[in-house]
């Protein structure tokens, strides 16, 4: 792994102004963990305020549109996220792929728009339970990677991949450490095939029911360079225990 372990909280559609207190507490505590890179992705409505409320941690979007602007009611562009103070954006989360029918090509276009806007990208991929049970997990995930990875001119450190088995998101279930290790290795190998050796700087995060109790074990797996955390990022106490496990 190049760079620091990266722990990112995805607040999804949770959080009004009162929750900025959690972000402030996380930011203050981040000073105790200088060897961990920490980010939070609040709902778009909180991005600007969170940017003002924190100093040490990164803030990011949960999605972006591939166009800079236009007649796309309800959407937010990468340029707008950047303008609101974002450092990064998540793209291709399974909830977007599923509920909003986003294809690999859509995700790729979003990732490219985000990079052009000067944002770092966390690109999510992951298999369903049925795909894993059928023995297709690795083929599905590497095909998603192939189809959604952005064209990049240098700066591979601007890209992180989040491997998130869909059946592990919000369920309390996690794959075995052997399965996580095998998938992250397969992702690393495919990244080398796509980008060449320079992609050693691309961090591969694990996501799906990461909690205080399992964080240390998951973060110790080879090729796991950090975590994307949903439910356990909503309070400073639970999120910081994961950050602490990465330190
Ligand atoms: C996610 O949705 O990105 C996620 C990892 O959620 P949770 O941690 O709640 O499983």
Image (cartoon, rainbow, N blue to C red):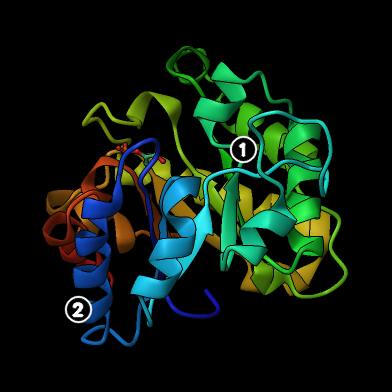
Q: Residue at x 28, y 75 (%)?
A: 27
Q: Quadrant of ligand 1?
A: top left
Q: Residue at x 25, y 41 (%)?
A: 231
Residue 122 placement (x, y as % from top left) = 58, 54
Picture quadrant of residue 166: top left
Q: Is residue 121 above or below residue 200?
A: above
Q: Residue at x 30, y 46 (%)?
A: 16
Question: In terms of sequence position, does the residue under pointer 2 or pointer 1 come before the other?
Answer: 2
Residue 10 placement (x, y as % from top left) = 39, 48
User: Is 161 on the left-hand or right-hand side of 70?
Assistant: left
Crowd around label 1: few <14 · some 14–19 · many ≥20 (10 Å)? many
Q: Which residue is mark 2?
A: 29
In the structure shown, which secondary structural element does the residue marked by tag 1 occupy? Answer: loop
User: Is 80 on the left-hand or right-hand side of 105?
Assistant: left
Q: CA distance from mark 2 to mark 1?
A: 29 Å
The residue mark sitting in front, 2 or 1, is: 2
Contact, mark 2 vs mark 1 (Cβ under 8 Å) = no
Crowd around label 2: few <14 · some 14–19 · many ≥20 (10 Å)? some
**Disc on res. 92:** 1
User: Is 129 on the left-hand or right-hand side of 219?
Assistant: right
Q: How many marks?
A: 2
Picture quadrant of residue 91: top right
Q: Is residue 234 above or below residue 154?
A: above
Whether residue 120 is visible to the viewer of this picture, yes or no, is no
């Amino acid at each position: 792994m190049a760079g620091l372990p990266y722990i990112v909280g995805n607040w999804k559609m949770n959080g009004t102004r009162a929750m900025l207190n959690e972000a402030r507490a996380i930011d203050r505590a981040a000073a105790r963990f200088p060897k961990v890179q920490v980010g939070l992705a609040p709902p778009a409505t909180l991005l600007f305020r969170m940017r003002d409320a924190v100093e040490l941690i990164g803030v990011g979007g949960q999605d972006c549109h591939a166009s800079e602007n236009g007649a796309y009611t309800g959407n937010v562009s990468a340029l707008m996220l950047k303008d609101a103070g974002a450092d990064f954006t998540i793209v291709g989360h399974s909830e977007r792929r599923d509920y909003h029918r986003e294809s690999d090509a859509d995700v790729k276009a979003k990732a490219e728009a985000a990079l052009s806007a000067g944002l770092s990208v966390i690109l999510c991929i992951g298999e369903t339970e049925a795909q894993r049970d059928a023995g297709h997990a690795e083929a599905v995930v590497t095909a998603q990677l192939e189809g959604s990875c952005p064209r990049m001119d240098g700066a591979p450190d601007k890209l992180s991949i989040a491997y998130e088995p869909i059946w592990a998101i919000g369920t309390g279930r996690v794959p075995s450490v052997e399965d996580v290790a095998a998938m992250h290795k397969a992702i690393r190998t495919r990244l080398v095939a796509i980008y060449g050796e320079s992609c050693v700087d691309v961090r591969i995060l694990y996501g799906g029911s990461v909690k205080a109790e399992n964080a240390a074990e998951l973060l110790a797996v080879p090729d796991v360079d950090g975590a994307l955390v949903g439910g356990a990022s909503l309070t400073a106490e639970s999120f910081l225990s994961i950050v602490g496990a990465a330190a």
